[in-house]
C-alpha cells in the first residue's frame, strides 16, 4: 500500500492523487500542513530532505519526492506513459516545461491570491507571475489547438502534470476565456471515468 504525504489543496500533491485514482491503486493519505511548518520537521526531512510535499512512501520505506518523478514511477508500464522514446521524451518535455515555465507562475499566483489574499508586499511579484503564467498558457493553447492531449492522441502523465494547476488557474487570477483549446482539454481530462477532483 502506498502512503502519500500531501495537502489536498496543493496541485503538486493532486497530481499524485489523480494518478493513483486513474490507475485504481489503493493508498493512505497522510495530511501535511505546510503553513504549520510540518514539512520542516526532522521526521519529515528524513523522508524528503528538500522539505516539500508530495512524498510517496513505498512498502519498503523508500520515499520518492518531486511530483513529476513520482508520476513517472507510478505510470511505468501503464497506458499513461508511452514506451516509444520520442513520445516518452515529449512527455518529459512537457513535465520540465511545467516545472520551469508554468508552475512557478500559475501556482505561485494562486498561492499569493488564494492563500495570502494578494498582500501589497507581493503585488509586483504577482504581476510578474501573471505575465509569465499567461505566456505558459499560450504555449499550451498552441499545442492543444493541434492535438487533443499534450502528447498527441493519448492522455498521458504530461496532461496530469499540467492539469493540476491549470484547472485552478482562475484561483490565481487567470482568465481562460480566450483559451478555448485549453478549456476543451480541461473538460476532456475531467471526463475520464476514473477522474477524481482535487478536493473530492
Ligand atoms: N518541484 C516540487 C515542488 C513541491 C512543492 O513546492 N511543494 C509545496 C506544496 S505545493 C511545499 O511542500 N511547500 C512547502 C515548503 O516549501 O516549505 C514538486 O513538483 O513536487
Image: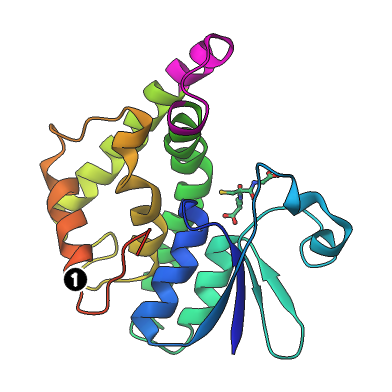
Percent x, y of residue 21 = 38, 78
Percent x, y of residue 190 = 21, 64
Q: Is residue 1 above or below residue 40?
A: below
Crowd rating for badge 1 (residues with CA inside 10 Å; few <14, some 14–19, many 20+): few
Percent x, y of residue 160 = 37, 63
Q: Is mark 1 within 8 Å of ligand 1?
A: no
Left/right placement of residue 78 relative to residue 32 reads left
Q: Identify the magenta region.
A: 113-128
Quarter of the image with the C terminus is bottom left
128 or 63: nearer the viewer: 63
Q: Is residue 149 at least partly visible in the picture? A: yes
Left/right placement of residue 54 relative to residue 161 reads right
State yes or no: residue 88 in magenta: no
Dominant SS type (magenta): helix
State yes or no: residue 120 in magenta: yes
> How is the rendered protein coloured?
rainbow
Question: Residue sitting at 39 percent across and 54 percent down?
Answer: 164
Question: Residue sitting at 12 percent across and 53 percent down?
Answer: 184
Left/right placement of residue 53 relative to residue 151 reads right
Amino acid at each position: 500500500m502506498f502512503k502519500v504525504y500531501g495537502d489536498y489543496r496543493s496541485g503538486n500533491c493532486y497530481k499524485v492523487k489523480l494518478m493513483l485514482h486513474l490507475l485504481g491503486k489503493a493508498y493512505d493519505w497522510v495530511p501535511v500542513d505546510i503553513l504549520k511548518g510540518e514539512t520542516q520537521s526532522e521526521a519529515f526531512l528524513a523522508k524528503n530532505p528538500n522539505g516539500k510535499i508530495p512524498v510517496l512512501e513505498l512498502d519498503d520505506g523508500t520515499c520518492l519526492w518531486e511530483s513529476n518523478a513520482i508520476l513517472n514511477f507510478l505510470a511505468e508500464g501503464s497506458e499513461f506513459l508511452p514506451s516509444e522514446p520520442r513520445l516518452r521524451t515529449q512527455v518529459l518535455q512537457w513535465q520540465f516545461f511545467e516545472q520551469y515555465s508554468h508552475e512557478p507562475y500559475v501556482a505561485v499566483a494562486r498561492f499569493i491570491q488564494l492563500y495570502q489574499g494578494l498582500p501589497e508586499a507581493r503585488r509586483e511579484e504577482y504581476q510578474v507571475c501573471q505575465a509569465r503564467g499567461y505566456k505558459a498558457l499560450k504555449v499550451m493553447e498552441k499545442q492543444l489547438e493541434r492535438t487533443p492531449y499534450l502528447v498527441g492522441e493519448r492522455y498521458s502523465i504530461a496532461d496530469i502534470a499540467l492539469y493540476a494547476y491549470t484547472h485552478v488557474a482562475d484561483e490565481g487570477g487567470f482568465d481562460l476565456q480566450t483559451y478555448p483549446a485549453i478549456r476543451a482539454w480541461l473538460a476532456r481530462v475531467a471526463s475520464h471515468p476514473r477522474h477524481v477532483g482535487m478536493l473530492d
